[in-house]
Image (tube, helix red, strand yellow):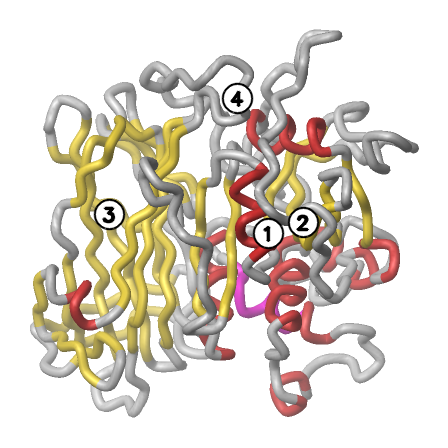
Amino acid sequence: MSAVPRPPAAEGAPGSPGAGLRAALHRWAGEEAFAAGVFEGTRWRDGALRLVAPVGRAPYDDPFGHGCLDWEFGRWTSPWTRLPFAAADVIPSWTAQAPDGARLEVRLQIRDGAGAAWGWYVLAQWCSGDAVVHRATVPGQSDGGGRVEADTFLAGALGVSAYRICVVLARRPGAAAEPALTRVHAAASLAPHNGPVPYGGPVPHDPPLPHDPPARPGAPAPVGRPGGAWGNVLDVPGRSQGVHTGHCPQWDGGGEAWAGPACTAMLVEYFGRGPAPGDLAWLDPEDPAPQVDFAARQVYDYGYKGCGNWAFNVAYAARFGLDGMVLRLSSLTDVERFVAAGLPVATPLAVRSGELPIGGAGTPGAYSYDTAGNILVVRGFTIAGDVVVNDPLSASDAATYRVYPRAAFERVWLTGGAAGAAYVLHPPGHPLPPDVPGEAPRW
């Protein structure tokens, strides 16, 4: 993949982990927030945005096997949201229900740094299941404003100065299924990165993405200041993707590529949620952790041909009553804030051999794998501030527990293809960390 030209990176304080990285998130959650947008055949009712009076009817031709079906629909469009910087990317995410016979279409329109409008871009054709229509992103969307890469809009040379989001709520005429939307988020960043990371290894139809060069030998690594979670390790169950190798190969080649579903299953389990036994009846009863296979099927992106779509992993958790959002964070200090609030954080990494030693800063052991894309769960920090993770790229559930030196982990996470990307799940009402005074909201 060739890199889209970027606006100049913002400057941070010398040596600060966030140098060159700025991030902001806007959320629409609750009746008052949605009231700022435009309703077309939709209304906030019973705690969600619902389709109440369809404004149109149109066919949607599912290219992945369900054929061309008619759908009736309504829309909600957010107001224009101005950014405090010219963003290099925007990643929408949402909390919704769209059972079989219902569907959401998530669209994005942007204004570039010169004020010109571009789009609408389709970021998702999404549904909770796959019996009536397949959830998918739409490849091949590119113009002067930028391009869509799976779950991420990558800006053109002038960046994104403002954006708005349109969510189309659709259902099959006469179907009992009803779409319901409770939250929409959009994370924007200005960061030196190379685009989205194909989690769990290269996607079959894409070559591995390039990495930023490693730090100069002897150069000091930026280290985020303490964020209140040193010595705090959350009790997150470990789930290995390796024990699922060969399972359900129709969804991203099987377990060896299931870093995203394994991490999402960990987060869901951490909150005591997950699929019921009846949901798992189609799986092998000898499966050691069938909830991972179930998650892989429910997050699989038929357009991207992978299970690493951040927004789809977040949206999956809504079936268990959880909210979630895709974020851009500025340093491990931000991650600590979430851990201190009792919230583990899923973080992607692209790692070259020799970049990330296993073990704390005082006791480094072997080096981690070389992978074009992985995702893991940060569950806490040692008393010395090193990073405690559950890494699904492991041979067993027990082996997922690892400790990485703080400086090395932060450098790889912030300067590689991930550029501070993360996603978080939480029960409604669970307090999020307070916003950082004087900075744009990042969650």
Classify 10 Å Cα crowding around label 4: few (below 14), some (14-19), many (20 and above).
Answer: some
Q: Residue at x 16, y 55 (%)?
A: 78
Residues marked 2 and 3 touching at CB (< 8 Å): no
* Cα distance in 3D space between marks 1 and 3: 25 Å
Query: From the viewer's perspective, is 114 left or right of 180?
Result: left
Q: Residue at x 29, y 83 (%)?
A: 178
Check disc 3 and give the amino acid type: Leu
- Residue 63, image x, y percentages: 39, 60
Mark 4 or mark 3, whichever is nearer to me = 4
Q: Is residue 250 visible?
A: yes
- In the rendered image, which quarter is residue 170 located in? bottom left
Residue 127's place in the image compared with 106, above or below, is below
Q: Which mark is residue 346?
A: 1
Q: Residue at x 60, y 42 (%)?
A: 348
For the magenta stretch, what is the residue range? 293-300
- In what element is the residue under mark 2? strand
Q: Which mark is residue 16?
A: 4
Check disc 2 and give the amino acid type: Leu
Judging by the rendered image, the residue that carries numbered circle 2 is: 376
Residues marked 1 and 2 touching at CB (< 8 Å): yes
Check disc 4 and give the amino acid type: Ser
Q: Residue at x 34, y 81 (%)?
A: 101
Give yes or no for residue 277 being in the magenta stretch.
no
* Cα distance in 3D space between marks 1 and 4: 22 Å
Q: Earlier in the sequence, mark 1 or mark 2?
A: 1
Mark 2 or mark 3, whichever is nearer to me = 2
- In what element is the residue under mark 1? strand
Mark 1 or mark 4, whichever is nearer to me = 4
Judging by the rendered image, the residue that carries numbered circle 3 is: 108
Residue 193's place in the image compared with 152, above or below, is above
